[in-house]
Amino acid sequence: MLSIPFTKRNSRSLTLAALKGAAMLAAIISSPVLAQSTLVYVGAYTRPPSKGISAYRLDAATGQMTPLGLAGETSNPTFLAVHPNRKFLYAVNEENEGGVSAFAIDPSSGRLKPLNRVSSRGAGPCHLAVSEAGDWLYAANYNSGSVAAFPICGDGSLGEAAGFVQHAGSSVNPQRQRGPHAHSANLAPGNRFLLAADLGLDQILVYRLDAGTGPFTPGDPPFARLAGGSGPRHMAFSRDGRFAYAVNEMLATVTAFRWDAARGRLEELQTVAMTAADYAGPRSAAEIAVHPSGRFLYASHRGDSTVAVFRIDPGKGTLTAIERTPTGGKTPRNFAIDPTGAWLLAANQDSGNVVQFRIDPESGRLSASGRTVEVASPVCIVFVKQ
């Protein structure tokens, strides 16, 4: 911040230089370029040369990405979540003795100041969600099949787990579904229910939240069942909160649900394929997101390294396929859409790059912008609008 000394000696005559400096600062602060500036954080597996979370600055007007270097050093930050106040960032530490790390965001440099790390209460944590009020964080542990709730302190640090639930059971695939594998903890709009997609059970478990104390209790009914061998992974909600969508890793499908927000119930409406009818390769769906406009849905498929684009029927919540776009790399573990809805960034884990696409606002179609950032083993992208 510009500081202009103010004493009895100079109180009657501020220098012209200082006034010009103040005017320049005001112009910079109010400029549309800075107003559209967004921090981009990329989490990665910490195999050399990766050391943790890297940062970039995105100019939403032009799509230009400026590298800011290593933002935070931490082990295997394979999923990231941002606090609603945009001052704090949280990362899983995907390890056998899993953890969740908290950081404070420096908005000017993009650097992440470590606050603390707590046990995730399970093995292989893979997903995080922060409550709308910013007072609780929820984590899914894939390897051990559990979900935990952590209080968020006033300084952004995390308390030890105050709520915990262990999933149990199996499903039809003996190689991948012999036990539970909680793959995401998804907060429904309104913050009254937590939906845990469990790949090992072919279920989306519904929990009623106690916002005051953190623990969660099974809903009624306690889960929605998907087709055997689906392997539900991540979820997204329609903009109006009336519909929910699950991307199913093992069958490479997307299931649309009607969401009853009053009773916490999912009603299946439709399941659509992410691949072409004649596709015979490996199936491995990964990420899902609804466009900020609410008109389109995107889902990544690692089997053929594409992003499938669907149009959302605003009244029915059902999906219509638009296109499948190659991600410009190999194994799109994750992607994210910037807050303006103009850009999609695809994190290609095995080719070590993040590729930028322009989103057509009318059709939802993707076109490569020609910009690629080299990142070792990128697996998660989040935006922090400034």
Image (cartoon, helix red, strand yellow):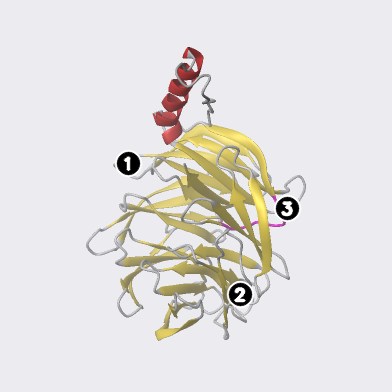
Residue under pointer 2: 161
Sequence-first tag of 3 and 2: 3
In magenta, the rendered stretch is 73-80
- Could you tell me residue 96's position as x and y percent? 73, 70
Please state the horizontal and vertical placement of residue 214, each as a whole percent of the image: 51, 76
Q: CA distance from mark 2 to mark 1?
A: 41 Å
Q: Which amino acid is tagged 2?
A: Ala
Secondary structure at numbered mark 1: loop
* Residue occupying image coordinates x 58% and y 77%: 162
Q: Residues within 10 Å of mark 3 (few under 14, many from 20)?
A: some
Question: What secondary structure do most residues of the magenta stretch adopt?
Answer: loop
First of labels 2, 1 by sequence position: 2
Based on the picture, tell me whether residue 154 belongs to the magenta stretch.
no
| Residue name at image x 62 percent, y 69 percent | 159
Would you identify the image quadrant in which residue 94 lies? bottom right
Q: Give the amino acid type for the residue marked by disc 3 in the picture.
A: Thr
Residue 190 lies in quadrant = bottom left
Above or below residue 198? Residue 116 is: above
Which residue carries the number 3 mark?
Answer: 46
